[in-house]
Image (cartoon, rainbow, N blue to C red):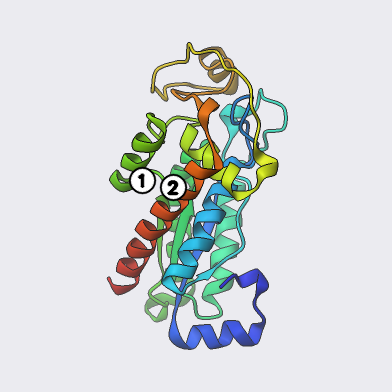
Amino acid sequence: MRLAQSTYVEVADYLKRSRGIIVPTGSTEQHCPIGVMGTDHIDAETIAWRMGGIADAMVGPTITVGISEHHMTFPGSITLKPTTYIALLSDYILSLVSHGFERFYILNGHGGNTATLNAAFAEIYNHLRCARGTGAPDVRCKAMKWFENDVCEAKALELTGHTARGHASAAEVSVAQFADPANIRKAKLDPEYGPLDHTFYNSEDFRRRFPDGRIESNPEHASPDIGRALVETAAAFHAEQYQAFLAD
Ligand code: NI
C-alpha cells in the first residue's frame, strides 16, 4: 500500500491492523557519468514498494533529497543542510505519529544520510518526551541502508563482481535501470578507479579524490536484469527485518 495512493478511509482501516510504515529515503546527487541523479531515492522507493507488497505494509512518500554536500561540485546535485533534513524528517514522522503510526522503518538509499537520520530520531524522541511526558506513545524509528547487509552484498558480488558499498556501484545503478528504462545510459568509463576509501572532506576535496564521481565502482555492466534480482533479494530481506522490527 502506498500512502500517496490511499484515501484517508483506507489509511484509517490500515491503522486498525498495523502501526508500522516504511519510509524510502535517498538523495538527488551525481552518480558518475552513467548513473542518474535520482539513483539513491529511486532504488529505495523501488525496493520499498516491493517490500510493502511482501510485508503487507504501508509505504510513505519518498524523501527524494538528502545530505549530499560532498557532491555539490557536480551539476544537478541538490543537498539539504543537516538542520533542514532533521526538520523535514521530524515533521514527516510526527505528522504520522499524530494519526497513530508508531513504527517507522526508514529504507535508505544513501549512506550520507545516516548520521543525520540518527540525529533526527533523537530530535523526535526528545520532542515526544518533552511534549507529552510519560504519556508519549512508544514511537520507534529504524534506519537501514538497503544494500548494507550480508545478503544484499553477497547478491551484488555474485551478479556484478563488485561491492554494493561503493558510490555509483553497478548494483545501485542496475536497480535504477530496472525501475525505469529512461535511467539507462551506456558509456566507457576510465578503468582506473579509486579504492573503496570513503575518506574525503569538503566537496572540492571529494572531486579531487574522485574526479568522475565514482568510489570503487564500475557500473558499465549494470543492467535492468541485475536490478530486478537485487530488488527481489533486498525486498525479501528487508520485509523480514521489518516484521522483526514490528515484533520487537
Ligand atoms: Ni548512491
**Which quarter of the rendering shows the N terminus?**
bottom right
Residue at the (39%, 17%) spot, across then down: 195
Question: SS class of the residue under badge 1?
Answer: helix
Q: Looking at the image, can residue 220 be seen?
A: yes
Q: Which residue is label 2 attached to?
A: 230
User: Of tags 1 and 2, which is closer to the observer?
Assistant: 2
Of 59 and 104, which appears nearest the observer? 59
Residue 210 place in picture, x, y as percent: 53, 17
The dot on residue 152 is 1
Question: SS class of the residue under badge 2?
Answer: helix
Q: Which residue type carries mark 2?
A: Leu
Residue at the (31%, 47%) spot, across then down: 151
Q: Looking at the image, can residue 82 be seen?
A: no
Q: Is residue 237 above or below residue 177?
A: below
How packed mark 2 is, by other alpha carbons closer than 10 Å (few <14, some 14-19, many 20 or more), is many
Of 25 and 90, which appears nearest the observer? 25
Of 234 and 2, which appears nearest the observer? 234
Q: Is residue 90 above or below residue 205?
A: below
